[in-house]
Amino acid sequence: MTTGVIQGVTVAHGRATVDEIESAAAADEETAVRDLLIRDGVEEAFALQTCNRAEAYVVTESAADGRAALADFAPDVRDGAVREMDHETSLRHLMRVAAGLESLVLGEDQIIGQLRRAFETARGVGGIGPVLDPALTKAIHVGERARTETEINEGVVSLGSAAVELADRECDLDGATALVVGAGEMGRIAAQAFDDTGVSTIVVANRTVPHAAHLADEVATTARAVPLDVTSDAAARADVLVTATDSPDPILDRSALADAGRTLVIDLAQPRDVDPAAGDLDGVDTYDIDSLETITDRTRAQRREAAAAVERMIDEEFDRLLDSFKRRQADAAIGAMYESAEMVKERELRTAVSRLESQGELTDEQRETVASLADALVGQLLAAPTKSLRDAAAEDDWTTIQTALSLFDPEFGGEEARPPTTERPREAPDADADGIPQHVLDRLGEE
């Protein structure tokens, strides 16, 4: 069992630009984890990469080793956009990410699926061990609780997703063609929201076509990218369109939609992307940002209340997880202490029995009496330090824990000191999984 600590680093939307996030990301999460695992001192590794964040976590024996392993995580990103996280901050941050509290859209659902996939990716390349496993499992558990026990993901707060909700209310999206004009964050959210509806095709128009193509690749629905200068042709064939560019001039004038037939237009741009006069055309219904305020205001207030409940939930789960880590680290030291003591006991017991047998044949009862005496001595001598190590863990006294691990290194007696087994030394009678005798555990419980 490792006693390492987690060190993390994140470049996310709250501090970084899209370009900075892209710069910090590796080719993919598997590549990121493999790269982290070959660094000095790294025992476990995890990476999470989405359009809004690039994060990496490592487990090392010391925090200093972890910081060194992550020192070049985002070399081309300005310092203010990079956030470093220690063990406890990393644990809490992962829970907040899973719960949607760190998302651009508060409480959005997509992130928990992304976290699960990243977890399995890291596990598949050997990045997950006894420290990251419970941390990520707990984070996902918190994310699930947040969505089932609160309304953190009810309604919409993003203009992009609100536009799609409005479109779904006003027209039948099953089999429809949706045009998204602009591949920025708002356009991205709109395309992802359309992906969850019944539309058959999504067209993404953008001045930089590769950006539009990247967004088209992100959705499961049939999608394609087109340049901005053919937006008029695409709009004429679309059933619903959402525009969200930063163009100073309209992208679509009245004539572009003159022959479009029944079309729903939702213009999220400021200044507008669509000439307001298009709304005078038969069959063309136009909406702007003001039309969405009632949708977003209602759900924004609702999610704020839910977020407060999720924060309290995270506090509770964080305390439980931290207590679990503390106990496990203490038990690692206690297990090493008992393992070392068992080696010495077995060696000395063999010597004592050999000497007694040289003085006369021993009965089975006599052998058991000598063995019980040895077990009792080990248990009584180690009961007090066992309690002290658990107290040290509860008080965050990791120096004592690490000192104990060094002092009670099971290898200290050399190979000859090891009992004849290929797995682990013989546990004391009625011992728990850490090799700690039950009578010692009972005594600790009474105290």
Image (spheres, rainbow, N blue to C red):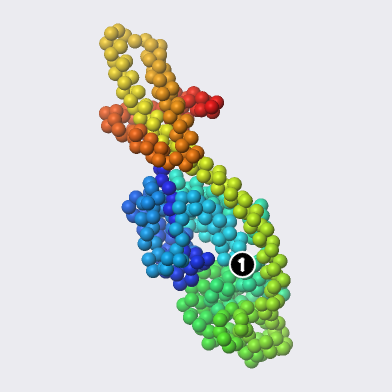
What is the total number of numbered labels drawn onto the structure image? 1
Quadrant in the picture for residue 416: top left
Which of 302/241 is in front?
302
Tag 1: amino acid:
Asp
Q: Is residue 236 above or below residue 350?
A: below
Which of 174/182 is in front?
182
> What x and y, as percent, mark residue 12?
49, 64
Q: Residue at x 52, y 49 (%)?
A: 137
- Residue 333 visible in the shown view: yes
Q: Is residue 339 above or below residue 103?
A: above
Q: Residue at x 65, y 73 (%)?
A: 163
Q: Residue at x 46, y 55 (%)?
A: 85
- Residue 126 visible in the shown view: no
> What x and y, as percent, mark residue 123?
44, 52
Circle 1 sits on which residue?
Answer: 196
Q: Residue at x 47, y 42 (%)?
A: 396
